[in-house]
């Protein structure tokens, strides 16, 4: 007998039903039904009980920039946001480009509130030239490779990476995933926001949409040539979404994510010159926001990611052109998705839980249906609870949320990590 999640509405990829969920001492779901008896009840009245959320794109800053975030604080922020797994980006210091750093990240993540899933760089030091020891990294459990922060600029290097990756499979036997941050730096250099009417008016250098779109186009072409499994990170423009839609229709093995900020904010937010709105790829136009939502609606965009990118107050207080790009996301993603993505509840959970779990190769323990014997990685949230965003009140070490003062609907009540309640009644326990 263990914990019983009582009185909630279970929503998973199989549908929904009002049932209690009993968690066994082994960290797995022991029973699903009515009238279950346990040692401890967690009240889920009025709440949705769902598979835990999975973020394909989190910058946890450790090793190297522990002032901005640590794996412990990032995972706590994740658990408070309903996440049970975070794919950690490899742009750490040193770069996560070898087995030793992967093992270090994994060890730091062991006691954390979420499962920390290290991704690894595609090229050594993310410099875009020399391939990382991908075979060894796969043997060490890595299933996703990315140079995130920059895209691989050289098409010949990208072709070789794609060719090599087609011979590698992850833990579950799926092809490993190459995740691309699409940005041709020759075009984006000197740009700090989206290039358009707002950048001209504000006198801030712009990054054209084409800087992203050219690389999306190139990688679709190379995927067709090599058969490699490509995932497009943080798609932000209408043309990018249209190209991925076409590639999928043609049967290419591509997937895509969009961040919460790319369907909630536009470049107009930069009018106050506040670097909290500086992010790569930059906030785009109303038409791009509409295209991202349409991409989510028709499944062109498989997953909603956070691109959670903590930065210290000092760093974000520099002038707009000098401040680092990036914004927090883990504690606001679910609420924003519920209210602004245009998706219904099951669509939101598909994009935040089971689809990203499948892309990251985690489907054996995250995102699966709420059924006996499945690992109890679960989140419980009240879809009607309202709250006000405050950067300082967040568990993250940094406070750079672009949603400061926003009133949002939908709040996490409990999160269970391998059966252990790590968030109870909205409070972190780990
Ligand atoms: Zn990126």
Image (spheres, rainbow, N blue to C red):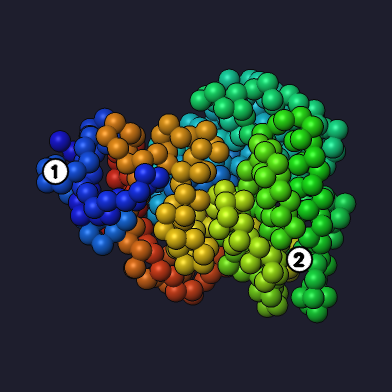
Residue 71 coordinates in the image, percent (x, y):
50, 43
- Name the front one of labels 1 and 2: 1
Cα separation, mark 1 vs mark 2, equals 54 Å
Q: Secondary structure at mark 2?
A: strand
Q: Which one is earlier in the sequence, the residue at label 1 or at label 2? A: 1
**Above or below — where is 244 with respect to 382?**
above
Residue 26 coordinates in the image, percent (x, y):
26, 30
**Above or below — where is 213 with respect to 97?**
below
Q: Does residue 66 appear in the picture of this structure?
A: no
User: Is 127 on the left-hand or right-hand side of 328?
Assistant: right
Q: Does residue 412 appear in the picture of this structure?
A: yes
The residue depicted at 15 percent of the width and 36 percent of the height is 1
Of the pair 423 and 357, the residue shown nearer to us: 357
User: Is 37 on the left-hand or right-hand side of 246?
Assistant: left
Q: Quick one: label 1, few (<14), some, or many (20+) residues within 10 Å?
A: some
State the residue position of label 1: 36
Q: Secondary structure at mark 1?
A: loop
Residue 86 coordinates in the image, percent (x, y):
50, 43
Residue 266 coordinates in the image, percent (x, y):
66, 70
The answer to whether mark 2 is within 8 Å of ligand 1 is: no
State the residue position of label 2: 194
Residue farthest front in this picture: 250
**Above or below — where is 391 with respect to 167?**
below
């Amino acid at each position: 007998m263990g914990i019983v999640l009582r009185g909630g509405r279970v929503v998973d990829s199989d549908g929904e039903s009002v049932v209690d969920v009993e968690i066994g001492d082994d960290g797995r779901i022991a029973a699903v039904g009515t009238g279950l008896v346990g040692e401890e009840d967690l009240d889920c009245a009025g709440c949705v009980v769902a598979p835990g959320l999975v973020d394909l794109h989190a910058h946890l800053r450790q090793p190297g920039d522990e002032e901005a975030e640590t794996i412990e604080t990032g995972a706590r922020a994740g658990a408070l946001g309903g996440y049970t797994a975070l794919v950690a980006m490899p742009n750490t210091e040193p770069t996560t480009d070898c087995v030793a750093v992967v093992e270090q990240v994994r060890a730091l993540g062991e006691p954390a509130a979420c499962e920390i899933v290290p991704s690894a760089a595609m090229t050594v030091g993310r410099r875009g030239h020399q391939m990382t020891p991908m075979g060894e990294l796969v043997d060490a459990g890595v299933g996703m490779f990315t140079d995130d922060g920059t895209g691989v600029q050289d098409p010949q290097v990208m072709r070789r990476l794609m060719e090599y990756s087609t011979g590698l499979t992850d833990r579950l036997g799926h092809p490993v995933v190459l995740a691309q941050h699409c940005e041709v730096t020759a075009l984006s250099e000197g740009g700090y926001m989206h290039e358009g009417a707002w950048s001209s008016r504000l006198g801030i250098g712009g990054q054209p949409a084409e800087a992203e779109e050219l690389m999306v186009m190139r990688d679709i072409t190379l995927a067709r040539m090599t058969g490699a499994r490509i995932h497009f990170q943080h798609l932000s423009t209408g043309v990018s979404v249209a190209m991925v839609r076409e590639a999928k229709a043609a049967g290419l093995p591509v997937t895509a994510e969009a961040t919460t900020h790319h369907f909630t904010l536009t470049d107009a937010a930069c009018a106050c010159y506040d670097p909290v709105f500086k992010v790569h790829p930059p906030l785009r136009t109303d038409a791009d926001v509409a295209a991202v939502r349409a991409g989510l609606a028709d499944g062109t965009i498989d997953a909603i990611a956070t691109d959670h990118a903590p930065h210290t107050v000092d760093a974000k207080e520099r002038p707009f052109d000098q401040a680092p790009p990036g914004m927090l996301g883990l504690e606001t993603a679910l609420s924003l998705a519920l209210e602004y993505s245009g998706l219904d509840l099951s669509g939101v959970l598909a994009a935040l839980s089971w689809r990203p779990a499948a892309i990251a190769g985690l489907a054996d323990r995250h995102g699966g249906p709420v059924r006996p014997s499945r690992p109890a990685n679960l989140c419980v949230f009240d879809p009607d609870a309202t709250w006000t965003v405050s950067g300082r009140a967040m568990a993250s070490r940094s406070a750079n949320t672009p949603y400061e003062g926003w009133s949002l609907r939908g709040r996490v009540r409990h999160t269970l990590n391998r059966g252990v309640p790590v968030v109870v009644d909205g409070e972190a326990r780990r």
